[in-house]
Image (spheres, rainbow, N blue to C red):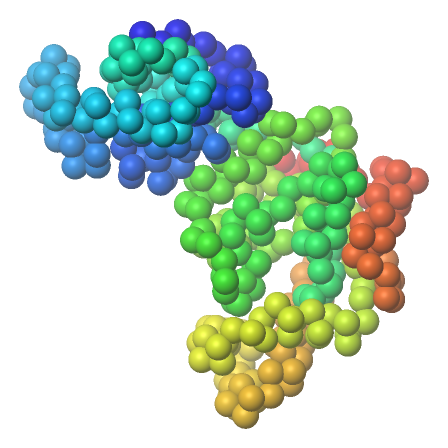
Amino acid sequence: MASFIPITEFLPLAADGMRAIVDARSPAEYSQGHMPGALNIPLLDNEQRAQVGIEFKKRGRERAIDLGFKLAGSSFPELAKKAKDISPHNKEILLYCWRGGLRSQIVSWVLGMYGYELIGLKGGYKTFRNQALEMLEQPLTLVVVGGRTGAGKTEILNHLAAQGHQVIDLEGLANHKGSAFGGLGMPLQPSNEHFENLIASQLMRFDMNKTIYIENESRQLGSNKVPDSLYLKMRDTAVIDVQLPTKRRLARIIEEYGHFPPAMLAEKTRNVEKRMGPQHVKAALELLDAGNIAAWAEAVMNYYDHNYDYGMEQRQPETIIKLECGEESHEEIARKISIMNLKAPKAIGVAGSSQS
């Protein structure tokens, strides 16, 4: 049987990457949200879990356990095979289910017979989820990196991370670049619950006394919503507004989106008709039909520039720090931002938020 430890001991073991992490819940539960890095080896599939739940409500715990063993018994060898696949050399595995109860105990019993040593999470995923939500409420010292569309903000964040700084890439975690076109070429988005888990897990690994760099985002990234507590902190601190020449930004937009089929770009363009206006959308679609990708990109860029400018107008003017750039590389821009923060951290990053 597994030895169950509290989350304060479990998380460091999960973070060191030395052991596989097994989520023993059903595939549906796992898809809804799980501990980042965990792999799903379900004791029961979705339908079987539902059957056991009904049995528990109608006839009680013992009858539900009997049914659970009956349904899962034939899958025990498959559990061992999957454990071997994810942990071929290390016989120590981290394990959790919903509340650290019966499913964890059964899986640990089965895998224990195959020679595995299981370390279970006391309180299961429910405990981790509560920890994640608490983490999102913590005070943060943020530096928000802004800039009009095509400014390369994500690339700047990547360089900041490469330079050793703490970075949260919301777009990367959400698999979405934030605009109507932001899902093009991106993997499937996580559930909103799991998006929150991904953010919280990064925060758990950070030194909360040091600056965290993050992109200036709207509340919504495709189907994912930035947690309210984090969004309020982002709006309550200063933003470094990276200003690049229009020509350079346009070239980046064409590079990022110009290779997609015109029909796909047209479909996404129609999605912003209510906000962009029927006349402007019609003109943009005609440019696509004519094969004039550059002119289409300029029309779309102008629309998003207006949106960005409106969002910046909602901030207090004194919280906007303009960083004018010419042909500097994004690596150089990232270095400039980090130097600005070192020289005037109180003016740029605000620890916490009165609204959070």
Question: How far across and down, in percent of the image, does residue 45 sit?
Answer: 21, 34
Residue at horizontal 63 percent and vertical 27 percent from the top: 205
Q: Quadrant of residue 217?
A: bottom right
Question: How far across and down, in percent of the image, does residue 235 sit?
Answer: 68, 48
Viewer-proximal residue, 351 or 27? 27
The quadrant of the image that shows the N terminus is top left
The quadrant of the image that shows the C terminus is top right
Res 306 seen here: no
Q: Quadrant of residue 326?
A: bottom right
Res 244 seen here: yes
Q: How many marks?
A: 0
Say left or right for 93 vs 26: right
Against 105, is 335 above or below? below
Against 23, is 302 above or below? below
Question: How far across and down, in percent of the image, does residue 101 sit?
Answer: 30, 15
Residue at horizontal 56 percent and vertical 33 percent from the top: 200
Against 222, is 275 above or below? below
Residue at horizontal 51 percent and vertical 52 percent from the top: 175
Question: How far across and down, in percent of the image, does residue 355 sit?
Answer: 64, 38
